[in-house]
Image: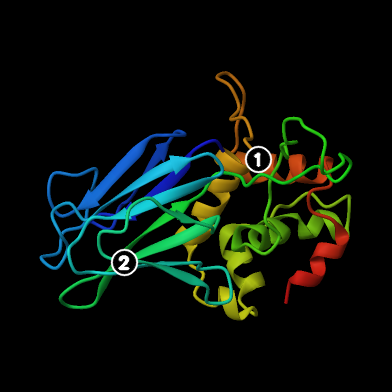
Amino acid sequence: MKGVLVQWRVASGETRSVDLDDGAELTFGRGEVDLVLDDPGVSRLAGRIRAAGDHWLISNLSRGSTYVVENPEGAGEFVKAAPRRLAMPVPFEFSRVVLPTQASTIDFLVFAPSHLYADPDIPADQVGEATMLPFPLDVTAKYFLVLIALCEPRLRDAAAVAIPTVPEIIDRLSGLESCRDLSRSAVNFHIDYLAGTKLRVKEPGEGRNAKADWQRAALVALVLRFNLVREEHLALLP
């Protein structure tokens, strides 16, 4: 993932998303902007998001409102963007941007690019391009729990054929405090995010018999082939 993914819900309840390449920007607010937040308590041009390398920047363009950027899958971490604060870097891979409104709050989600990590086999003083992880997965993220649940039958029995359905994944993870409010749409989003962004599985071409669950099957096949989810990860399940 080279840019950032911004996701929000419109009034009809439909989910929309925009991919931003490195250096691209997205404006948000209640006026003529890219992401419309229809509330009288939100400024017409409330802020701007810009993709920047392995992270993203937020600018608060309001005169008096502080925005909060939360890490929904962490331990309550958050950062604040004060009024008129420009180009503040956000350290979270998965973030919820929360704006105050007259009634309560309004928010949208931002998924950051894959973070860069140093190659442990290269001396610290050696100059060179950083090694990029081909499949950058965060084992503390909720999407990784969904991935474990998908792979569990095959990890416990290599001859297993059935792949868990979305309702079965919800039921399997319901024993975890962080997953008690997990919905069908949330699980589907995590699966889409894994398939399209994190692991980049290929959709079957035309003329091939693709079952409705091709995405889940492709994820399981790829993950187990490269040992991205292993038997020890089952300990993260309830």
Q: Which of marks 2 and 1 precedes in the sequence?
A: 2
How many neighbours does mark 2 have within 10 angstroms: few (below 14), some (14-19), or many (20 or more)? Answer: some
**Residue 29: x and y, percent?**
20, 54
Residue at 58% across / 18% down in the picture?
Answer: 207
User: Of all residues shown, which one is farthest toward the top?
Assistant: 207
Q: Secondary structure at mark 2?
A: loop
Q: Which mark is residue 199?
A: 1
Q: Is residue 183 left or right of residue 142?
A: left
Of residues 26 and 183, the one drawn nearer to the viewer in this rendering: 26
**Residue 12: x and y, percent?**
22, 56
Which amino acid is tagged 2? Ala
Which amino acid is tagged 1? Leu
Q: Quadrant of residue 73?
A: bottom right
Q: Which mark is residue 82?
A: 2
Q: Quadrant of the N terminus?
A: top right
Q: Is residue 154 left or right of residue 178?
A: right
How many neighbours does mark 1 have within 10 angstroms: few (below 14), some (14-19), or many (20 or more)? Answer: some
Q: Quadrant of residue 116?
A: top right
Q: CA distance from mark 1 to mark 2?
A: 35 Å
